[in-house]
Amino acid sequence: LRKKTLTEEDVEVKAYLKIKAEEEKELTEDLKKTLWMVRLRNFIVENNFTDALAYLMAIPMDSLRPYEIKAFAGDGREIVFGMIQNEAKNENYPNLLKIFEFYNDRFERKVNREPLTRYLVGKALLNIGTYDAFDANYEEFKNSKDAPAREFPLWIPRDDSFSSDYLM
């Protein structure tokens, strides 16, 4: 699914994501994985992060190859970024930090780090007054500044007008 803004015409396309029990028997392992990824990305593009995360957690990651795990982890990173961004917009900083702490090791460390996430976490830490944790986050932020930028998958729009140096 590459379309970032869905229209009424796309409702028909989404119907193909539902398969019947008799059709499932004919799916190869690669087709199943592709279907999982398309369904997951559909949730992400629709900003339905709760369902996307639940769907991702139901995928049997232990049965996947390392490069497939990395692809799903990238999508998981996008889901977490979307959730963090929503909490930042709503100024719900405790929930933002809970999301970050719970999912950081699971997804962010498997794909390139993103300075914007560290910035939002740092802002949340300052707003709730945990300055020691902010200092540790700032060190991580400085370390991620020179990391290669994530280019794919980027399903959640970002404000590219801020550089890492500006955010610091």
Image: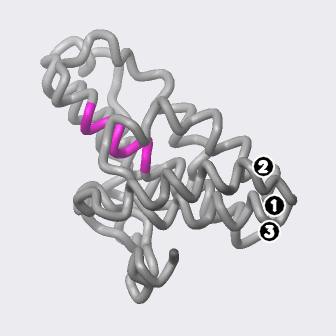
Q: Amino acid at mark 2?
A: Asn
The residue most toward the right is 129
Answer whether residue 42 is magenta in the image.
no
Q: How far apart in space, not on screen, are marks 1 and 3 (Cα)?
A: 4 Å
Using the image as rendered, state which of residue 166 and residue 69 is in the foreground: 166
Horizontally, residue 80 falls left or right of residue 26, namely right
Q: Quadrant of residue 110?
A: top left
Which mark identifies residue 92? 1
Residue pictured at 31% horizontal, 49% vertical:
112
Magenta part of the protein: which range? 70-77
What colour scheme has been applied to the protein in the rendered image? one colour
Task: Work out whether residue 129 can be spotted.
Answer: yes
Q: Amino acid at mark 3?
A: Glu
Residue 48 x %, y % = 57, 53
Mostly what secondary structure, the magenta segment? Answer: helix
Q: Amino acid at mark 1?
A: Asn
Dot 2 crowding, Cα within 10 Å, few <14, some 14–19, many 20+: some
Residue pointed to by mark 3: 91
Task: Work out whether residue 1 can be spotted.
Answer: no
Q: Is residue 86 above or below residue 94?
A: below
Residue 5 x %, y % = 39, 74
Residue pictured at 41% horizontal, 79% vertical:
165
Q: Is residue 44 above or below residue 104?
A: below
Residue pictured at 57% horizontal, 49% vertical:
49
Q: Quadrant of the N terminus?
A: bottom left
Helix, strand or loop under label 1 = loop
Q: How far apart in space, not on screen, are marks 2 and 3 (Cα)?
A: 9 Å
Horizontally, residue 121 falls left or right of residue 69, namely right
Residue pointed to by mark 2: 95
Marks 1 & 3, CB-CB < 8 Å contact: yes
Marks 2 & 3, CB-CB < 8 Å contact: no
